[in-house]
Image (cartoon, helix red, strand yellow):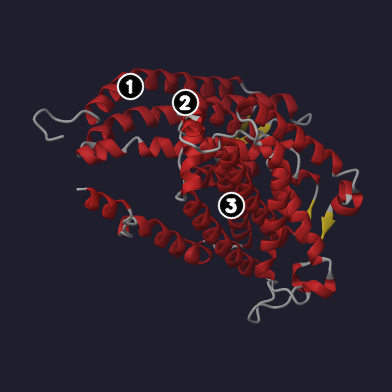
Amino acid sequence: MTDLTQKTAHVPPAVTLGNTLPWILSIAFLAIAPQIFSSNSAITIMNQMGITIVFALAYNMLLGQGGMLSFGHAVYMGVGGFACVHIMNMETFFSYLPLPFLPIFGGVVGMLLAVIVGSFSTRRAGTVFAMISLGVGELIAACSVIIVVFFGGEEGISGDRTYGMPFFGIEFLQHIEVYYLTAFWLLLSAFLMFMFSRTPVGRMANAVRDNPERAEFLGYSSRWVRFYSFVASGFFCGIAGGLFAINYEILTEENLNLATSGGILLMTFLGGAGFFFGPVIGAVVFILLQTVLGLQTDLWALYVGALFLATVMFFPGGFAGLLMMHVTPIRLGKMHVLYVPYLKTFIPGILAVLGICSVIEIVFHARHAPLGDEDMTIFWTTFNSHSIVAWIVAIAIAVIGVWLTKKAAPGLVEAWHEANTPDKGASA
């Protein structure tokens, strides 16, 4: 029995279709996405998504895997990006450097900064670590307008990616070429971060997150586990900064400040910090809301904040947790039980949201529109925002939607319990 235990304990996990299928699908989707969304604006948005996903996954190495809440993590991405821009401006050196290797320099710079900051910030976790990260973030952001040589002051630093040595004849003049470069680094970084989460250090980061005292009792140093995770996160943040420098060719104080750090925190929570793919969902949703919804209304940030608040209050696991909640009904073969209750609840729920948003937009337009500009358009419908009829219709839609949603909610709860309860006599 002992020999059998020793032999089976060292057997590596098998590579199955379930393990590799998500990566295969990701590669296939990233390869054909520019053919599906071929406009320059769509490719620009996808580039932004790719960079943000790398940044969000790197941040989740701290928050989701290590339980370390950072309020200033944008500095590692920003400093890595600034370093890459400076390399772009070194014409002699950059002319011999293929552009696809540039993010490595950003990763190294981000890692070195993480080594310095992590040497004292990872001694403690919880509130102490969060406050240190906030102080470091504000300190470096303030230095961005003082140390002009490196940060360029308020104007920032700009470069030109086309000065780099062509890579197999590719000079990266077009957005589509930058897209495939970003997609390559996205897949490589995501895979390396996923593999890191499967290493002993990554596993122990989860243990330190859940119970640091027990990890210390087992002989592991919580401080060093946090330090290694922090340094690895800084490296991948620097890679995201290098990709940002390649894509936008300019970095400013905005890439370092608290708003950027808060945005990545919001994305991670929105997608689900407890799951590896959660930040991917959060980054995609946030960028879509910021770009697509931002073109339709000036109040997009208000709606994102409300969505974030609703997620924290009702779905702390984020969108990824919401998806994973359905694993049990699927395994029990009871997913069909939820179809009708979902329709009865979500359709009036969407109606309520649209009604509430309409009321907010009408109020905002009526109070802030230029004098004489009384016409506004919501959901492809143009009307007078000062008309009492518009107010009555919007309020009525909101009230009816909320009432129907509350009426259907008990049926959804009952159906949910039924879908998650095994049938009597079924084998465990």
| Residue at 44%, 50% in the rendered image | 198
SS state under label 3: helix
Q: Nearer the viewer, residue 275 or 405?
A: 275
Q: Are marks 2 and 1 in contact (CB under 8 Å)?
A: no
Residue at mark 1:
408
Label 2 neighbour load within 10 Å: few <14, some 14-19, many 20+: many
Q: Nearer the viewer, residue 226 or 405?
A: 226
Label 2 vs label 1, nearer the camera: 1
Q: Position of residue 366 (x, y in %)?
A: 69, 25
Label 3 neighbour load within 10 Å: few <14, some 14-19, many 20+: many
Is residue 296 in sight in this rendering? no
What's the distance in space between the residues labelled 3 and 2, CA to CA? 35 Å
- Tag 3: residue type? Val
Q: Earlier in the sequence, mark 1 or mark 3?
A: 3
Q: Earlier in the sequence, mark 3 or mark 2?
A: 3
Residue at mark 3:
54
Q: Are marks 1 and 3 in contact (CB under 8 Å)?
A: no
Q: Are marks 3 and 2 in contact (CB under 8 Å)?
A: no
SS state under label 1: helix
Q: Is residue 156 above or below residue 314?
A: below
Horizontal arrangement in the rendering, residue 362 relative to residue 407 (left or right): right
Residue at mark 2:
352
Q: Position of residue 396 (x, y in %)?
A: 48, 20
| Residue at 51%, 34% in the rendered image | 208
Which mark is drawn over residue 236? none
What's the distance in space between the residues labelled 1 and 3, CA to CA? 40 Å
Is residue 196 in sight in this rendering? yes
